[in-house]
């Protein structure tokens, strides 16, 4: 008999999975048994919820929330302010010119307040702002329409609007390459600024799109410890462990090699050992999917390539990685 992943971890942190309209059906039994939290992979992003001004489309997001309710799962909200999957109308006047700061702030507030209030009773935490740190160079923030239209304080405003809409929701800043030393410092600088200005923020989300060779355990530890000094909680929000390094563009494998499988299990073991060690600050670990039959990595960074990043295989059976993280 296969034990439940989330039950095994119930004294440490919750175990989540990203879901979508299809996997909520095709992976239903697996989700029910092993995960006690879900995140919408795409269905709560701006372009999905408000594709046109004041035309909200909640049907699919509602369906995911009902699934969670019926099965007593938590829901993480993802995401309110991001540079991707965000429609252009927000930043544009009827004549095509860039809308002014006040207009864009009002549109941001209207979106955040409508969405966050709608799910007040069902969504306990939100990735309010996603991926605003610049990957390279000296600039703290990446270039984006939000930054261009509003200015640097769009981040403070997003958190404030979310807090006004639901004072009980836990509000997160979420990003990737979170343990890369230079980006770690930048994320820290941003979040420390928010904390120092008393902006309502409660957590840092580490996406954890990792692979067999990176990041190092040491860099992960340093990131967790650094963010924890801010007095915020930490969640791993989008975990997957690709069998390919980011620069590996091979396309010819029909299944992972024995080596890859063994190293992946070892890596999962190492990661979860660290997570358990820091379970006083880590409140959740969410995978960006549930099993190897479906992952966004089949299209990223190489289109049409299988990736096998999870602890359950394509038939929803436990992999060696699963047994490793169950051993404690
Ligand atoms: C991804 C989804 O998984 C894909 O289906 C979609 O095409 C693009 O977005 N960081 C994030 C997530 O914060 O929202 C992204 O999700 C993956 C990277």
Image (cartoon, rainbow, N blue to C red):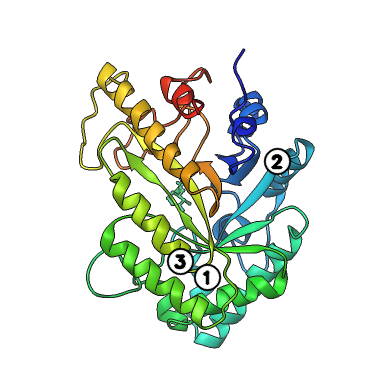
Mark 1 residue CB less than 8 A from any atom of ligand 1: no
x and y, in percent, of residue 136 in the image: 24, 65
Q: Secondary structure at mark 2?
A: loop
Q: Secondary structure at mark 3?
A: loop
Q: Which of pointers 2 and 1 lies earlier in the amino acid sequence?
A: 2
x and y, in percent, of residue 206 in the image: 44, 53
Closer to the camera in the image, 311 or 9: 9
Number of other residues with Cα within 10 Å of mark 3, as a class: few under 14, some 14 to 19, many 20 or more: few
Residue pictured at 37% horizontal, 38% vertical: 299
Image side of residue 203 versus residue 182, left or right? right
Residue 281: tell me if it is visible. yes
Residue 92: tell me if it is visible. no
Image side of residue 121 versus residue 250, left or right? right
Residue 89: mark in rendering: 1
What residue did someone put label 3 on? 229
Q: Which of pointers 3 and 2 lies earlier in the amino acid sequence?
A: 2
Mark 2 residue CB less than 8 A from any atom of ligand 1: no
What residue did someone put label 2 on? 73
C-alpha separation, residue under disc 3 versus residue under disc 2:
30 Å
């Amino acid at each position: 008999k296969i034990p439940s992943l989330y039950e095994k971890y119930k004294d440490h942190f919750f175990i989540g999975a990203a879901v979508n309209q299809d996997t909520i059906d095709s992976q239903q039994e697996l989700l029910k048994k092993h995960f006690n939290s879900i995140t919408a992979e795409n269905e709560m992003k701006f372009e999905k919820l408000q594709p046109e001004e004041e035309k909200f489309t909640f049907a699919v997001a509602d369906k995911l929330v009902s699934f969670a309710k019926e099965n007593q799962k938590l829901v993480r909200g993802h995401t309110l302010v991001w540079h991707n999957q965000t429609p252009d109308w927000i930043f544009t006047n009827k004549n095509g010119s860039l809308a002014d700061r006040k207009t864009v702030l009002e549109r941001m507030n209207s979106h955040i307040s409508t969405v966050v209030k709608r799910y007040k009773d069902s969504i306990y935490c939100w990735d309010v702002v996603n991926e605003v740190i610049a990957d390279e160079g000296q600039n703290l923030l990446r270039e984006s329409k939000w930054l261009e239209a509003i200015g640097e304080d769009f981040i403070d405003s997003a958190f404030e609007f979310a807090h006004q809409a639901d004072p009980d929701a836990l509000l997160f800043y979420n990003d990737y390459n979170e343990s890369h030393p230079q980006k770690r410092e930048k994320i820290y600088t941003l979040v420390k600024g928010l904390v120092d200005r008393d902006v309502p923020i409660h957590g840092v989300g580490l996406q954890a799109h990792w692979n067999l060779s990176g990041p190092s355990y040491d860099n992960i530890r340093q990131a967790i410890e650094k963010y924890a000094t801010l007095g915020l909680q930490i969640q791993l929000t989008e975990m997957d462990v690709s069998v390919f390094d980011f620069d590996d563009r091979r396309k010819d494998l029909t299944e992972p090699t024995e080596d890859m499988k063994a190293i992946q299990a070892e890596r999962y073991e190492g990661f979860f050992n660290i997570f358990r060690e820091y379970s006083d600050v880590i409140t959740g670990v969410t995978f960006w999917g549930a099993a190897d039959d479906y992952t966004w990595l089949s299209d990223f960074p190489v289109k049409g390539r299988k990736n096998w990043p999870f602890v359950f295989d394509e038939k929803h059976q436990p992999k060696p990685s699963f047994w490793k993280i169950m051993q404690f």
